[in-house]
Image (spheres, rainbow, N blue to C red):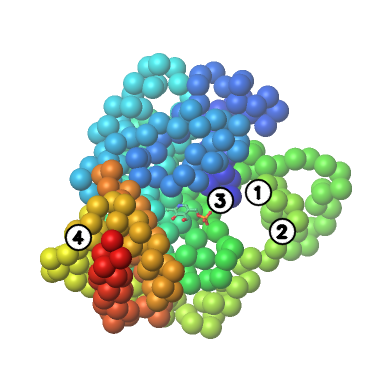
């Protein structure tokens, strides 16, 4: 939902055409949204949900570290401008979903500023690690984004569901979502009515989602959260080193945050898929999957504050034991 809200706000900020009334067909050119080849599918969903259409999504290639190729982005923006396309926003990632890659925001922000295009950073998974000393300032230019999404229900360890969107242009939200109606006019000057949330988001009635975040921060404090995130990154790197030291596993991507993509070298993609399913069934550890350079990857994402080095060593042990059981059945 946060992504759809952002894209809607970016769309309103990108034009004086009243798209709320006339829809995107009234735009002067074909709409365009720029993502990297690793970007989360929620952007495509938002484009389809908002009636912009998935054809508006332009995929920019990534470099060897799975980060958006900034020169390719600049070229694409220039080409599309010449072609008269309507540019809504660029979506960069602060921890993309497959490998945790962190885009080069500073350079992307320069390109967006020169082109006059809104920069959204999808930090749903990774942005809460921005302060970690372990990432060497890789997110120090986050403040240059026009909007940033981050998910407390991921790396703030909060229960589902609480997405968060930080956005600089409140006016764009108002233009996107404000609908005059007599029964919601604010007729009191009491402080509590100053910010009418329904004028800034799709929801009218809304839950008090922020309460659990406020409580979580009050009870545990920001320091404890930072330490837990740091520890998750350290544990992920321990897993990556364990994999690199082993003969029967191969690391498929760098580990900038807490996602580790790897494969068991004693079998092909089909075997690795079976391995993942068996490990999930076993219930001891939970692995998910990704596709890295066309190869099936086992994906470990460490976002539980209780996970330790011993747990990921156990994971490696479990995968080996499962692999040998599967082979003995063949
Ligand atoms: C990078 C990234 N972006 C967006 C999302 C979507 O977030 P949500 O599941 O809160 O809608 C996710 C969730 O997996 C994600 O990892």
Point out which mark residue 266 bears.
4
Q: Secondary structure at mark 1?
A: loop
Q: At which x and y percent is residue 207? A: 70, 63
- What is the CA distance from the residue labelled 4 to the residue labelled 2? 51 Å
Look at the numbered disc 4 and give the secondary structure of its residue. loop
- Tell me what residue is drawn at x 52 percent, y 66 percent: 153
Whichever of labels 4 and 3 marks the residue nearer the N terminus, that label is 3
Q: Closer to the N terminus: mark 4 or mark 1?
A: 1
Among the two numbered marks 3 and 1 on one chain, the one whose residue lies closer to the N terminus: 3
Residue 255 seen in render: no
Does the CB distance between marks 2 and 1 fall below 8 Å? Answer: yes
User: Residue at horizontal 74%, vertical 63%?
Assistant: 192
196 sits left or right of 215 in the view: right
Q: Quadrant of residue 36?
A: top left
Please tell me in which quadrant of the rendered image residue 237 appears.
Answer: bottom left
Query: Gap between marks 2 and 3, in whole Å?
Result: 14 Å
- The residue indicated by pointer 1 is 201
In the rendered image, which residue does mark 2 sit on? 206
Q: Looking at the image, how many numbered discs can be counted on the residues?
A: 4
x, y percentage for residue 42? 50, 46
Q: Secondary structure at mark 3?
A: helix
State how far apart marks 2 and 1 are (Cα): 10 Å
Q: Is residue 35 visible?
A: yes
Q: Residue at x 23, y 57 (%)?
A: 267
The disc, 2 or 3, on the residue closer to the chain's N-terminal end is 3
Where's residue 56, x and y in %? 48, 29
């Amino acid at each position: 939902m946060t992504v759809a809200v952002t894209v809607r706000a970016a769309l309103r900020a990108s034009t004086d055409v009243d798209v709320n009334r006339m829809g995107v067909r009234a735009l002067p050119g074909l709409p365009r949204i720029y993502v990297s080849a690793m970007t989360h599918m929620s952007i495509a969903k938002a484009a389809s949900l908002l009636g912009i259409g998935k054809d508006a999504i332009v995929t920019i290639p990534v470099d060897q570290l799975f980060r958006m190729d900034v020169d390719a982005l600049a070229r694409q923006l220039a080409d599309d401008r010449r072609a008269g396309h309507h540019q809504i926003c660029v979506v960069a990632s602060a921890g993309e979903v497959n490998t945790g890659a962190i885009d080069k925001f500073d350079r992307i922000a320069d390109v967006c500023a020169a082109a006059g295009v809104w920069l959204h950073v999808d930090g749903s998974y990774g942005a809460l690690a921005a302060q970690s000393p372990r990432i060497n300032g890789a997110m120090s230019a986050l403040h240059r984004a026009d909007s940033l999404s981050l998910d407390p229900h991921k790396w703030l360890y909060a229960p589902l569901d609480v997405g968060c969107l930080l956005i600089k242009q409140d006016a764009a939200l108002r233009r996107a979502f404000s609908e005059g109606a007599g029964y919601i006019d604010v007729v009191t000057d009491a402080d509590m009515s100053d910010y009418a949330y329904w004028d800034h988001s799709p929801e009218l009635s809304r839950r008090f989602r922020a309460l659990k975040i406020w409580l979580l921060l009050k009870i545990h404090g920001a320091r404890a959260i930072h330490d837990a995130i740091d520890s998750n990154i350290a544990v992920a790197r321990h897993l990556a080193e364990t994999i690199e030291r082993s003969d029967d596993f191969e690391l498929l991507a760098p580990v900038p945050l807490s996602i580790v993509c790897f494969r068991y070298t004693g079998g092909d993609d089909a075997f690795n898929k079976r391995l993942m399913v068996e490990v999930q069934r076993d219930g001891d550890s939970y692995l998910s999957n990704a596709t890295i350079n066309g190869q099936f990857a086992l994906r470990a994402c460490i976002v539980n504050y209780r996970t330790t080095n011993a747990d990921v060593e156990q994971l490696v042990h479990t995968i080996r034991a499962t692999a040998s059981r599967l082979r003995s059945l063949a």
